[in-house]
Amino acid sequence: MQQEWLDYVLPQVYWAIGFEPAAYDVLVPWWSEQVDGTDVALWIGQATYKVGTSTQSPEWSDPQEMVRHLDLNEDYPQVTGDVYFSAKDVRANRLDHWPLLQQAHYANPALPPALNPGTTEEVETPTGLRTARTAEGTRLSWSHAGDDAGFAVYRVDDARGPGRVDCDDLDADSLVAVLGDGHTDWVDPEGDKHDVYVVTALSRDNTQSPASKPKRGR
């Protein structure tokens, strides 16, 4: 990590908050300190398999335990993601904990983390953003010169006018869609004429392009 030979590190912090032998709230700060000041991404391995399992420590009988893990992560900006073990345990949804986690931390779409921020060639900016009103909502379409790009769609407040959107406006709260490769259109079911949209392109390693020219909704 100190030599930045790794793209990311994924410690399996498979213990509860306050679990004395290996507490989540001790280990996450320690790992955050190790990557601080480097370009190594820190993603935390979460023990979904322990939720609602009688052989584990008592904390895992509380469906809010995993929610508290991500609450704590928010205090450490070095933590940029989580990985859940295992997929079958996510699907099992013991104690109905997964909807609680979604409501608290995954209610909105999110960008996948860039693997090599600042080191890859800039991806082309989407052009020709258009909006149209349909029965389903505001339909957006655009053009892109690159191959295999993904796209992120942002909806921002239009109080300053559509020509004054800048990168500072493009935060998680304004992200409304993340689209897979080749999708150059999207319908916003909640959009209206008072909204302004911009679109960015995502390279294969999730580097984000500059924003398109803003376009008012319909």
Image (cartoon, rainbow, N blue to C red):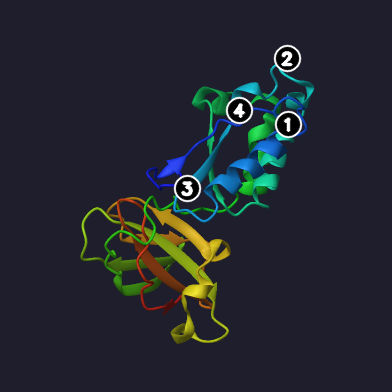
User: Mark 3: few, some, or many residues within 10 Å (few <14, many ≥20)?
Assistant: many
Residue type at tag 3: Ala
Q: Confirm whether residue 37 shows in the render.
A: yes
Q: CA distance from mark 4 to mark 2?
A: 13 Å
Taking the spot 67% from the left edge, 28% from the top edge, the residue there is: 15
Question: Which of these two is toward me, 123 or 218?
Answer: 123
| Position in image of residue 59 (x %, y %) | 77, 27
The tag earlier along the polypeptide, 4 or 3, is: 3
**Mark 2 or 3, closer to the camera:** 3
Q: Is residue 104 above or below residue 139?
A: above
Picture quadrant of residue 201 = bottom left
Taking the spot 70% from the left edge, 46% from the top edge, the residue there is: 72
Residue type at tag 2: Ser
The tag earlier along the polypeptide, 4 or 2, is: 4
Q: Which mark is residue 48?
A: 4
Q: CA distance from mark 4 to mark 1?
A: 11 Å
User: Mark 4: few, some, or many residues within 10 Å (few <14, many ≥20)?
Assistant: many
Q: Identify the residue under disc 1.
A: 63
Are dots 4 and 2 in contact, CB under 8 Å? no
Q: 77 left or right of 6? A: right
Residue type at tag 4: Thr
**Mark 4 or 1, closer to the camera:** 4
Mark 1: which secondary structure? Answer: loop
Q: Identify the residue under disc 3.
A: 41
Q: Identify the residue under disc 2.
A: 54
Are dots 2 and 3 in contact, CB under 8 Å? no
Are dots 1 and 3 in contact, CB under 8 Å? no
